[in-house]
Amino acid sequence: MDKVYLLKKLEQEIVDNKNLPLKSNLVFGEGNPDGEVIFIGEAPGAIEDEQKRPFVGRSGQLLRKLIRQIGWKEEDVYITNIVKRRPPQNRDPEPEEIEKYKPYLTRQIEIINPKIIVPLGRFAMNFFLPNAKITRDQGKLFSAKGGSASVGKARNWFVAPMFHPAAALRAPIMMQEFEKSFKKLPAMLKKLTN
Ligand code: URA
């Protein structure tokens, strides 16, 4: 089935689900539905809410710059968030919000079927790797069980957690680590596609 159609249908399901928390604009995600890499943040901020696009503010500019620096194109990857609407005052998403949006992210990943999932920051990382620690585990490649376990489709996902770009913008030491980890991505992808 056509991935563009399936993603549109999934987006419409989110629109139609009036029980979902948060009432700001829906920021579903964007990029190549056949992308080999998916970047996942925690939730949209003010600019993302305004433009209805993920990672278009300061953090997003850094993320997109690094994608280009490793020789990839923004249009070749897919970019989204766990929670698809902005929490008020940019507070952290609450566990219940993550829980409610979780099935949609899972299905979005299943449709795109990327080779590598790159969660940005600890919220996104813990979605895939509940026991991982961001400072210890960012920049490493993990295999995690994911997918719609309830319908018997659980499969292995390859997950490479990174710092959130906002954290990198706050401290030079984090920026160095973030850039260093990011540069490993092409080799990780190559290893998984060979
Ligand atoms: N931070 C996120 O986690 N996601 C965005 O889309 C923007 C900022």
Image: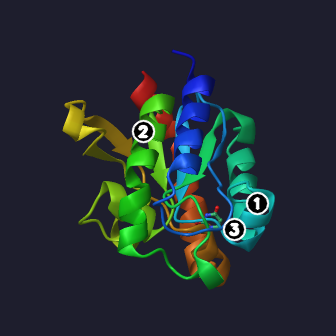
The answer to which of marks 3 and 2 sits earlier in the sequence is: 3
* Side of 141 where 80 appears, left or right: right
Callout 2: SS:
helix
Q: Quadrant of ligand 1?
A: bottom right
Callout 1: SS:
loop
At which x and y percent is residue 73? 73, 38
Whether disc 3's CB lies below 8 Å from ligand 1 is answered yes
Whether disc 1's CB lies below 8 Å from ligand 1 is answered yes
Q: Amino acid at mark 1?
A: Val
Which residue sits at x=51%, y=61%? 83
Quickly name the residue at label 3: 59
Residue 186 can be seen, yes or no: no
The answer to which of marks 2 and 1 sits earlier in the sequence is: 1
Marks 2 and 1, how far apart in space? 23 Å
Whether disc 2's CB lies below 8 Å from ligand 1 is answered no
Quickly name the residue at label 1: 56
Q: Residues within 10 Å of mark 1 (few under 14, many from 20)?
A: many
Q: Amino acid at mark 2?
A: Arg
Q: Which of the numbered marks, if any, corresponds to residue 107?
A: 2
At which x and y percent is residue 183? 58, 50
* Side of 194 where 61 appears, left or right: right
